[in-house]
């Protein structure tokens, strides 16, 4: 099994964000955003390169088709953030508290998601390559139709995941603290799990294969 390649981030000296709100197709290079309130703002198509976002509020923020490159997001929070069709490359997302994030159709490459909790993460039809979920809690994530290649789950709780139509290549679930698949358990082909996880998944696998277990 090929392990995920992690981002190697070395941020340059950053310029403090001057306020004024985000803009569609905005270009943010080497900017530090601290405790900024972006609730309801529209930054569709914006580019964030060599940036640091710390403690920012992203409720209903529109970031469709945005690009996050060589950046670190720490302690961001929000509900309904729209990152559909976004490009996220060489990024660390640390201790996020997010709900209903839309990442459908997005492309994630060399990304580490560490700590925090994300509820109802929508990754339908997304592409994840060299992505590590580490020490985080994912509640009802939707990977429907997504492609996962060299993805690792390390000390991560995966609750009620939807893998319907997903394609998994070199996906390592052995280090996950919990693996709970609600739909698409047959799509685990291409993943590696531990013996304990196999036993936990046995009832779901039996139902999928039409096996009746009695006694």
Image (cartoon, grey):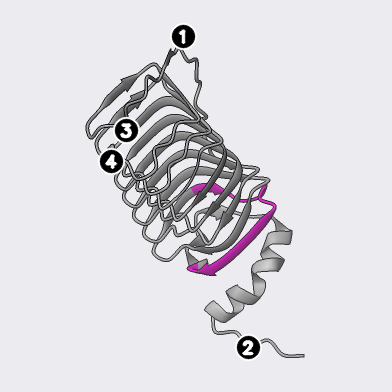
**How far apart are labels 2 and 3 at the CA level?**
48 Å
Q: From the viewer's perspective, is residue 23 above or below residue 122?
A: above
Image coordinates of residue 101 in percent, x first then y, are 43, 51
**How far apart are labels 1 and 2 at the CA level?**
62 Å
Q: Nearer the viewer, residue 79 or 5?
A: 79
Mark 4 touching mark 1, by CB under 8 A?
A: no
**How far apart are labels 4 and 2 at the CA level?**
52 Å
**Left or right: 142 with respect to 158?**
left
Residue hosting label 2? 212
Labels 4, 3: front one: 4
Determine the image quadrant of residue 3.
Answer: top right
Q: Work out whether mark 1 precedes mark 2 in sequence or the reverse, and give the earlier one.
A: 1
**How far apart are labels 4 and 3 at the CA level?**
14 Å
Image coordinates of residue 19 in percent, x first then y, are 36, 24
**How far apart are labels 3 and 1 at the CA level?**
20 Å
- Quadrant where the image shows the N terminus: top right
Residue at 35%, 26% in the rendered image: 48
User: Is 174 in the magenta?
Assistant: yes
On residue 42, the disc is 4
Q: Secondary structure at mark 3?
A: strand
Q: Work out whether mark 4 precedes mark 2 in sequence or the reverse, and give the earlier one.
A: 4
Label 1 Cα neighbours within 10 Å, binned few <14 / some 14-19 / many ≥20: few
Among all residues in the image, which is located at the extreme front?
20
Q: Work out whether mark 4 precedes mark 3 in sequence or the reverse, and give the earlier one.
A: 4
**How far apart are labels 4 and 1 at the CA level?**
27 Å
Labels 1, 2: front one: 1
User: Is 202 in the magenta?
Assistant: no
């Amino acid at each position: 099994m090929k392990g995920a390649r992690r981002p190697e981030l070395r941020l340059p000296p950053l310029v403090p964000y001057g306020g004024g709100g985000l803009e569609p197709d905005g270009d943010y290079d080497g900017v530090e955003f601290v405790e900024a309130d972006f609730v309801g703002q529209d930054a569709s198509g914006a580019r964030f390169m060599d940036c640091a976002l710390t403690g920012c509020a992203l409720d209903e923020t529109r970031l469709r088709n945005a690009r996050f490159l060589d950046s670190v997001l720490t302690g961001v929070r929000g509900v309904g953030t729209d990152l559909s069709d976004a490009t996220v490359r060489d990024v660390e997302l640390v201790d996020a508290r997010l709900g209903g994030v839309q990442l459908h159709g997005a492309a994630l490459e060399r990304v580490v998601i560490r700590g925090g909790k994300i509820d109802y993460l929508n990754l339908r039809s997304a592409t994840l390559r060299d992505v590590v979920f580490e020490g985080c809690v994912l509640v009802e994530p939707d990977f429907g139709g997504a492609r996962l290649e060299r993805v690792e789950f390390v000390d991560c709780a995966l609750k009620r995941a939807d893998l319907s139509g997903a394609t998994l290549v070199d996906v390592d679930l052995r280090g996950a603290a919990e693996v709970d698949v609600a739909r698409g358990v047959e799509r685990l082909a291409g993943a590696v799990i531990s013996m304990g996880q196999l036993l936990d998944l046995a009832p779901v696998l039996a139902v999928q294969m039409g096996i009746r277990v009695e006694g």
